[in-house]
Amino acid sequence: MDVYEALADPTRRAIISMLAERERNAGDIAAGFPIAGPSISRHLKVLRESGVVSYRRQATSRIYRLEPDSLSLARQWMDAQLDLVKARFDRLGAHLDAMKASEEEGAG
Amino acid sequence: MDVYEALADPTRRAIISMLAERERNAGDIAAGFPIAGPSISRHLKVLRESGVVSYRRQATSRIYRLEPDSLSLARQWMDAQLDLVKARFDRLGAHLDAMKASEEEGAG
DNA sequence: CAGATATATAGCTTGACGGCTAATTAGCCG
DNA sequence: CGGCTAATTAGCCGTCAAGCTATATATCTG
């Protein structure tokens, strides 16, 4: 599963928000949701396999941490799309300015 | 469907890329993919209903356009998460610097 | 090793998604 | 209105995701 599919589920986004704030173990994460532990475990697996989170062991628990790089990548993609739109918008503005200028030249 | 689910499908992301470059009608969009027209039409519906694209009529065709605001919103959410992580990282760095300074003070 | 705790995996069910073809709607032209 | 084109909607099917409970794995403790 890629990062976009990982982001598609609201529970997973909430987990990301929790982990953005600070690291937590799986149990603490699960405690924050009304759904069963195994379901959270599966969400964590999705997040792991898409590179959004990593974990380290501490005794019997797994401490999960957000890995910013995968999110950054998704953000960069959005940035690129938004930049294209903005560039187009700016060109349109310049074009309109040029039209207006030549109009005034013709009139004056 | 929200913008994150809209982004989850690779075909829809490709449509977004096409529209970031310039407006296109539904037929031209569909021509860029190996899947049937109605399937593209459904993707466009998802993108419409999640606010990612809009369209205007021109004769019998619909000209689709990317609406940057919804993408911006998703990007802002990512920014916020990444900022939290970065802030934590910076605090950790400051903490380590302070530790190191007090160590040197003790040694010197 | 036996027991306890924390987490993950297996197996199942249900609902949604994405693909297809066929039928329908919307607008243009004679 | 009748025909033409562009696009969407309807209906169907296979696959997959997300929830659940029950079972298995991993680690610490005695």
Image (cartoon, coloured by chain):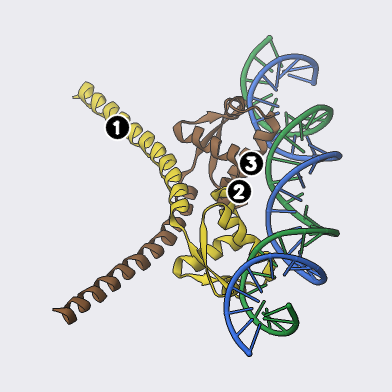
Chain colours: A brown, B yellow, C blue, D green
Discs 1 and 2 share one subunit: yes
| Residue B6 place in picture, x, y as percent | 58, 53
* Other residues around mark 2 within 10 Å, as few (<14) / some (14–19) / many (≥20): few
* Residue drawn 35% across the image and 32% down it: B92
| SS under mark 1 | helix
Q: Residues within 10 Å of mark 3 (few under 14, many from 20)?
A: some
- Measure the C-alpha gap from mark 3 to mark 1: 33 Å
Q: Residue at x 52, y 53 (%)?
A: B51
Q: Chain of mark 3?
A: A
Task: In the rendered structure, find residue B94 and report the number of the disc placed on it.
Answer: 1
Describe residue C11's horizontal placement relative to residue D4 as left or right.
right
Look at label 1 and name its amino acid: Ala
Marks 1/2: CA–CA distance: 42 Å
Which of A88/A29 is in front? A88
Which residue reaches farthest left? A108
Mark nearer the N terminus (1 vs 2): 2
> Disc 2 versus disc 3: distance between alpha carbons?
24 Å
Chain at numbered mark 1: B
State the residue at coordinates (61%, 38%): A44
- The amino acid beneath tag 3 is Lys
Q: Quick one: SS at disc 3?
A: helix
Q: Which mark is residue B1?
A: 2
In which quadrant of the rendered view does residue A60 lie? Answer: top right
* Subunit bearing disc 2: B
Q: Secondary structure at mark 2?
A: loop
For disc 1, the neighbor class at 10 Å (few under 14, some 14 to 19, many from 20) is few
Percent x, y for residue A5? Answer: 60, 50
Q: What residue sits right under mark 3 in the picture?
A: A45
